[in-house]
Amino acid sequence: MDKKPENYPVATFAGGCFWCLESEFRALNGVLYTRVGYTGGDLDAPSYRDVTTGTTGHAEAVEVTFDPAKVSYRDLLEFFFTKAHDPTQIDGQGVDLGPQYRSVVYYHDEAQKKAAQDMIDYLEMNKMFKKQITTTIEPAGTFWKGEDYHQQYYEKYEEKTGMPHIRVLLKQGKKR
C-alpha cells in the first residue's frame, strides 16, 4: 500500500538501519503501511545527511500502520525484540554504529508504553538474551518522513537490479 491508511493504529520503532527494520515489518501479515524517517531529535525537518552525523539526537525509525484484527501491538513488540533487531546492542546494529541507530520503542499512548515495558520485563525475567536489553521507551514526537529514495528501499533495489540487496541476503543467511 502506497498511501497511509486512516483510522488504524501506528507503532514507531528504531533499531539500526531503517531500511532493514522497514523490510522486516513490511513482511508481517497485518502491517498495512510503513514509512521510514527520523524522530527523537532536536532539529526540525532533518535530512539523512544531518542525522548520519549522529549529532541531531534523531534516530532512524520506521512508522508502522497496522490492522489490530490481524496483528496486535504486542505481536509487533515481540517481533521487534526477538526477530527484527538486537535489543542488547548499544547505539547500533551490527556495523551501523552511532546514536542514530539506537534501539527505541516510541509510544503513542499509555497502553503502548505499558505494553513495551511489560515486554521488556518479560524478556528480562525469562532471560531471553545473554545481555541486558538496552532499548529505551520514549514518547513519540514529531516523525520526520525520510527522503523518498529511502522508502521501501530494498523493494526498489530489487526492482531496479533484479536481485536482492546484499544486506537482505546476509540477513536471510543468518535465519537459516
Image (cartoon, helix red, strand yellow):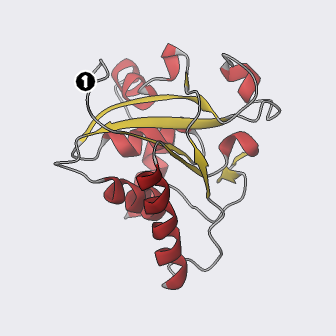
Q: Residue at x 67, y 22 (%)?
A: 48
Q: Which residue is mark 1?
A: 1
Amino acid type assigned to the residue bearing label 1 in the image: Met
Q: Residue at x 48, y 43 (%)?
A: 21
Q: Is residue 89 above or below residue 12?
A: below
Towards the viewer: 95 or 36: 36
- Residue 37 lies left or right of residue 47; in this view the side is left
Q: Residue at x 83, y 32 (%)?
A: 55
Q: Quadrant of residue 139?
A: top right
- Residue 39 lies left or right of residue 125; in this view the side is right
Q: Position of residue 98 (x, y in %)?
A: 76, 44
Q: Residue at x 39, y 18 (%)?
A: 160
Q: Position of residue 99 (x, y in %)?
A: 75, 44
Where is the N terminus found, in terms of image quarters? top left
Towards the viewer: 96 or 10: 10
Q: Quadrant of residue 51?
A: top right
SS of the residue at dot 1? Answer: loop
Q: Is residue 110 above or below residue 167?
A: below
Q: Position of residue 72 (x, y in %)?
A: 27, 54
Q: Is residue 91 above or below residue 146?
A: below
Where is the C terminus found, in terms of image quarters? bottom left
Q: Which residue is at the far bottom?
A: 126
